[in-house]
Image (spheres, grey):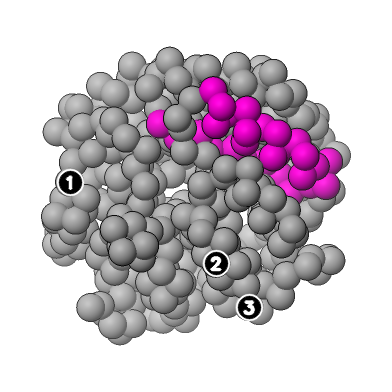
Amino acid sequence: MLTKYEIIRWLTKTDERELIKLWRMADDARRLFLGDNVHLRGIIELSNHCDRSCWYCGINAKNKRVNRYLLTEDEVMEAVDQIITYGYKTVVIQAGETQLITTKMITSLVKSIKKKADLAITLSLGERSADDLRAFRNAGADRYLIKFETSNSKLYHRIHPTQTSPWKDRFEIIAFLQKLGYEVGSGIMVGIPGQTIEILAEDIMNFKTLGLDMISAGPFIPHPDTKLGQLAVDRLDINTPDSQVPNNEQMTYKVNALARILCPNANIPTTTALSSINSAQGRELGLNRGANVIMPNVTPIEYRQLYEIYPNRICIKEFDVCAYQKIRERILSIGRQISQDTGTSRQYLSKQGG
Ligand code: 5AD
């Protein structure tokens, strides 16, 4: 078991020759516990409406430049058809956190998808009420994603301006989702201004404490129409626990590798944000350093550029990087396979006694 001290030691190393050892440990843990399968999750961005004003996110409620949309059920079902054609076994429905998306909309959608195909359904709709989360689960939803973003409550409150929420914090939501029997995913952004190496080490330890089934850590990418995007941050050296965490590629790989070593049974995606900062190799390097999941975007093409949580997302102009055939080739080229099942988290199965 890695101690906090050892996690900090890895996080402060930048020499690639030394880091090879970390990459190898993460890759070995992934292979030993989960094998070579890569699970593909088709992600549908249901809506870019959002009621919240998070300091990092491009689709925050205050951003008047965003052209807002909400897909119709027919549009979602067309994207689901595409998922079926491509042979993906999981559909992820993601949207901003908004009351425009009603309970009924989601329960009806979940039922329609379940009726149509044997797909696992993951929801990522923000801080919904307890009644909603229960209704979605009863309708057939299998998984829920809600990032805690940072486990430092002072930093959390700084970047999430107060507003009414039925929840004390996101940890309370995670516990509730687990109680409802969802497979639960959470995670963080790497390099949020104000995030220190020590805070990051605590985040990583929390992945384990929370018993997460899915873990996602992508780089923070500044968006010009947000508070944090307009804030200049001093880039200090990262050799002490209270240094600012850089939002770069290497740091993101380190966080994902450490997450894999601490939580060998969890599903870990190579995030779109990571491939957005290295479109040539980000995905493969993520997969070689602990990740076992890719989430290809299947949102109808005309809406994709409107879901701009951060700038220069891939799969908007560079279709080829995302296109189905390309993703398959890239997985096979690094000696991995494409999973043929829904890819339920081993962590979840082990908790169910399976
Ligand atoms: N950079 C990176 N990730 C972001 N997210 C939102 N805005 C950004 C950004 N600027 C991620 C957050 C959030 C999810 C919806 O997208 O982690 O949970």
- Give neighbour class at mark 1: few <14, some 14-19, many 20+ (Cα, 10 Å): some
List the residue tagged with mark 3.
Answer: 153
Mark 1 against mark 3, which lies toward the viewer? 1
The residue lying at 70 percent from left, 58 percent from top is 127
Distance from Cα at disc 3 to Cα at disc 2:
23 Å
Residue 15 placement: quadrant: bottom left
Q: Residue 107: x and y, percent?
A: 69, 40
Horizontal and vertical percent position of residue 208: 38, 71
x then y, percent, for residue 103: 77, 44
The correct choice, above or below, for 10 with respect to 317 in the image is: below
Where does label 2 land, which residue? 179
* Mark 2 surroundings within 10 Å by alpha-carbon count, few (fewer than 14), some (14 through 19), many (20 or more): few
Badge 2 amino acid: Lys
Q: Percent position (x, y) of residue 13?
A: 27, 69
Residue at 20% x, 27% y: name it. 332
Segment colored magenta: 89-116
> How far apart, in angstroms, are the residues tagged by discs 1 and 3?
36 Å
Q: Which corner quadrant holds the C terminus?
A: bottom left
Which element carries disc 1, helix, strand or loop?
loop
Q: What residue type is labelled 1?
A: Gly
Badge 3 amino acid:
Ser
First in sequence: mark 1 or mark 3? Answer: 1
Asked if the magenta segment contains residue 53, the reply would be: no
Q: Name the residue under label 1.
A: 35
Residue ID at (57%, 77%): 152
Q: What element carries label 2?
A: helix
Q: Is residue 310 visible?
A: no
